[in-house]
Structure formats: C-alpha cells, structure tokens
C-alpha cells in the first residue's frame, strides 16, 4: 500500500499529521520531500493531484510520445 501523508519533523522524529494505517513496529519505506520544495510548489501551479512517482512516470512517458506517429517532431 502506498500513501502520501504530511508530517512535521521535530527533534529527529517525523510526526504524521494524521494517523497512519500500519501497526506499531511494521516496517515501511519512506520518501521525504520538503513542502517548501520548488518542485512541489510547481505541482500546485499545474494543479497536479498525483504522487511524485506518478509525475515522474508521466514525464518519462512524454519522451516516448515523440517516437509515436503524429507525435512531436
């Protein structure tokens, strides 16, 4: 399961702004990005509602469009 959750970093600990669905002691993978990041601010400008990973996949797919008939030259 993948979710995106806002958190606050205090005294070396990330504190989620809302409860998370995992049990105590369960191992998870964490990717952290500052909400002050220029990339995240640009998401707001374009109205992006997906995850960072989804945007990366969409951008990677855009390169392939040029190879399709009728794509950009």
Image (cartoon, rainbow, N blue to C red):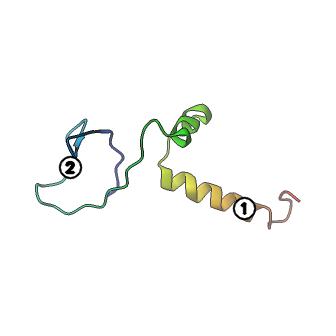
Secondary structure at numbered mark 2: loop
Mark 2 nearby-residue class (10 Å; few <14, some 14–19, many ≥20): few
- The residue lying toward the viewer, choosing from 54 and 29, is 29
Q: Position of residue 58 (x, y in %)?
A: 61, 55
42 versus 29 height, above or below: above
Q: What's the residue at 62%, 35% (across, down)? A: 46
* Residue at the spot 55% in from the left edge and 42% down from the top edge: 39
For the point 37% across and 55% down, which residue is it?
31
Q: Which mark is residue 21?
A: 2
Q: Position of residue 28 (x, y in %)?
A: 25, 61
Viewport quadrant of the C terminus = bottom right
55 sits left or right of 14 in the view: right
- For the N terminus, the quadrant is bottom left
In the foreground, 1 or 28 = 28
Query: Residue placed farthest to the left in the image?
Result: 24
Q: Label 1 to label 2, Cα distance in Å?
A: 36 Å
Q: Secondary structure at mark 1?
A: helix
Q: Which residue is mark 1?
A: 63
């Amino acid at each position: 399961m993948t979710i995106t959750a806002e958190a606050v970093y205090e005294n070396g600990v990330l504190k989620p702004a809302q409860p998370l669905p995992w049990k105590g002691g369960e191992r998870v993978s964490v990717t952290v990005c500052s909400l002050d990041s220029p990339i995240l601010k640009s998401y707001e400008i374009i109205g992006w509602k997906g995850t960072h990973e989804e945007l990366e996949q969409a951008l990677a797919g855009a390169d392939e469009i040029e190879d399709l008939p009728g794509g950009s030259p």
